[in-house]
Amino acid sequence: MKKVYALLTAFVLTIAAMGQTLNVKVGNVTYQFPATQTGDMTYANGTELTIMGKTFTLSEISSMTVDDTSVTDGAIAVSYNGTSASMTIAGNVAKYVTPTISGAHVSIAQSDDLAEEITYTLSGTSTDGEFYMSGAYKATMELNGLTLTNATPVYSGAAIHIQNGKRIKVKVVTGTTNTLSDASSGTQKGCLYIKGHAEFAQKGTLNVVGKVKHGIKTGEYMTLKNATINVTSAVGDGINCAEYFLMESGTVNISGTGDDGIQCDIDGDASTGETTDHEDEDTGNIYISDGTISITVTANAAKGIKSEGDLRISGGDITVNTTGGGVWDSDDKKTKASACMGADGNVSISGGKLNLTSTGAGGKGINGDGTFTASGGVLTVKTSGNAVVASSSGTLSTVTSSQQLDRYDSDYKSSPKGIKIDGAILISDNSVISVNTTGAGGEGIESKTSIEITGGQTTVDATDDAINSSYNTSTNGSGDLTISGGYVYARSTNNDGLDANGNCYIKGGLVYAVGCGTQNTPEVAIDANTEQQKKLYVTGGTIIAMGGLERGSSLTQACYSTSSWTKNKWYSMTIGSETIAFLTPSSGGSTLVVSGASKPTLKSDVTVNSGTSILDGIVCTGATVSGGATVTLSQYTSSGGGRP
């Protein structure tokens, strides 16, 4: 005993004099004690050695060495090498952690009295390893060139499992590529699972494969800055979190999922509402302010981005593709289909660039239960699937005509729609929206409450109604459609251009509407619900309507018409000193109606020499034109009652 004590005393004096580090190795774990912190070491019972509060049994110590290694307080490094792993632990946190290594399977348990943050740095490669950490104090995890596959789980089926409900900062170290793959069996919730809230940062790349459930799963909120996350396959969602999801920069690429791309749920029983700096927030909201997102989902009824709360987009470059068809939900007794974006709450777009494409049966670009507000950004939506319907037994099939679709109750069908919102729709300011929908029942923009357009640029090409303000008893909506500003192009090849199930108000803006019929057929360019004693009211704006107006309209601003126009030709309409050029469609009702602040002068087959192109090159404002023939216009009257 005296000899051991003398040797230890010599160690202390040596490292103190030289300012070096005492390395105590236990198996594949090395504890590093800086001389400046070590102080007195206690040797007891001839079997135990205590350094900085960490007690070792002498029989477990593989070696003790002194070198000039620099030690960073609060640092734990794990290095993987094939079927083995090694670890270094800074002396100041040694007494607070219990490490276990089995091959390349690593587990660390933090003690409950830990009161300082530990940074775990993971590096190296293993085809059969994992990292498991439990504790109750916030931590940082650095992924520094890590390739880790969990082939035969010891502690968890996840590649990385953080059983810690506090804030976990995940640094994807700049310039590194990291790849994670979980076990093919087990109960893990994700390949990378964090019980608490995860904050991803730095400019590295993280590749994830989820073989059992989700790619990345966090029990609470998730934020992302700078890092690139690639989920190349997952049985469940690519990214699944609760409370809220916030992306401020970086890149997310998701494909090969069995369910949604990104999903965020409310963690508790009810939403807290948005809070200052998101402190203690639990909303199920998704916030995207910048960065790049590319998502492709193929599963039936899957969503590219799905929030249980609101979906708020103020910037970024977002591309979402869905190809899956519909499903019959036997619990809700309802047919459901895919959507590029879905929200149980409100949807707001104030910036960014969004490209949404849905090709599956009944698929939608945006599907929301709350309201939809667009005040900025560029939104492009394309849907090309037919409608999906269910029999009374839940057997699914597709239909290719609106007549077939009309035979089914609403719960037994899902139609392709560009933007489908249960609440009100408001389009304003600098928003640019382009929607193209084909297939049976393919509507462009639909609200079950009301639609108001006060600005922006809205272009819709649809098989069914291009822009439709519907209503149902549960929303208590008016079904009104109001346009008071902006540029609107609404074309339907089989129905109404603008269809209000309440009143339709044209008060301002430039409106180009194309319906498939005439005043003597059911479908018109601009429609209102005269069956319920509603009307079309024209009090202002500039109007071009191919297919006539709803009968019984109130035309405070005079309208003029001609029944002769040529397809696919440029026309010019001059109102006062302003000239507008517009391209006629390849199909549409026979009656052309125009209106402005004064009686327009209309010319056919003109050559457009200049002007400001809007609405995808279909309309030019401030145009200068040459040639063409003047078209004779007569005052348009919309007499009678009821639907034409």
Image (spheres, rainbow, N blue to C red):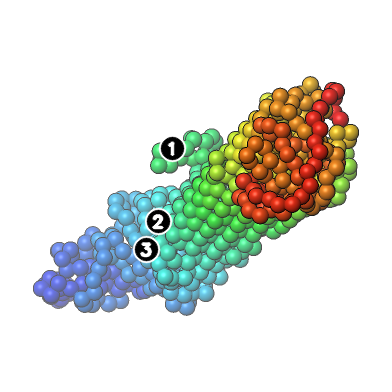
Tell me which amino acid carries mark 3.
Answer: Tyr
Q: Around disc 2, counting alpha carbons within 10 Å, would you say few (fewer than 14), some (14 to 19), or many (20 or more)?
A: some
Image quarter of residue 56: bottom left
Q: Which residue is mark 2?
A: 169
Tell me which amino acid carries mark 1.
Answer: Thr
Q: Around disc 3, counting alpha carbons within 10 Å, would you say few (fewer than 14), some (14 to 19), or many (20 or more)?
A: many
Q: Is residue 428 left or right of residue 561?
A: left
Q: Is residue 423 visible?
A: no
Q: Which residue is mark 3?
A: 120
Residue at the image position 46 percent from the left and 52 percent from the top:
248
Tell me which amino acid carries mark 2.
Answer: Lys
Viewer-nearest of discs 1 and 3? 1
List x then y, in percent, for residue 628: 76, 50
Q: Which residue is mark 1?
A: 275
Alpha-carbon span between mark 2 and mark 3: 10 Å
- Mark 1 in CB contact with mark 3 (< 8 angstroms): no
- Can you say which quadrant of the picture contains the C terminus? top right
Alpha-carbon span between mark 1 and mark 3: 31 Å
Residue at the image position 14 percent from the left and 64 percent from the top:
40
Q: Reading the chain from its start, which is encountered first: label 2 or label 3?
A: 3
Q: Nearer the viewer, residue 32 or 495?
A: 495
Residue at the image position 44 percent from the left and 77 percent from the top:
81
Q: Reading the chain from its start, which is encountered first: label 2 or label 1?
A: 2
Alpha-carbon span between mark 2 and mark 1: 21 Å
Dot 2: what SS? strand
List x then y, in percent, for residue 416: 75, 47
Q: Around disc 1, counting alpha carbons within 10 Å, would you say few (fewer than 14), some (14 to 19), or many (20 or more)?
A: few
Viewer-nearest of discs 2 and 3? 2
- Compared to residue 13, the image places residue 268 above or below, namely above
Q: Is residue 543 visible?
A: yes
List x then y, in percent, for residue 448: 70, 33
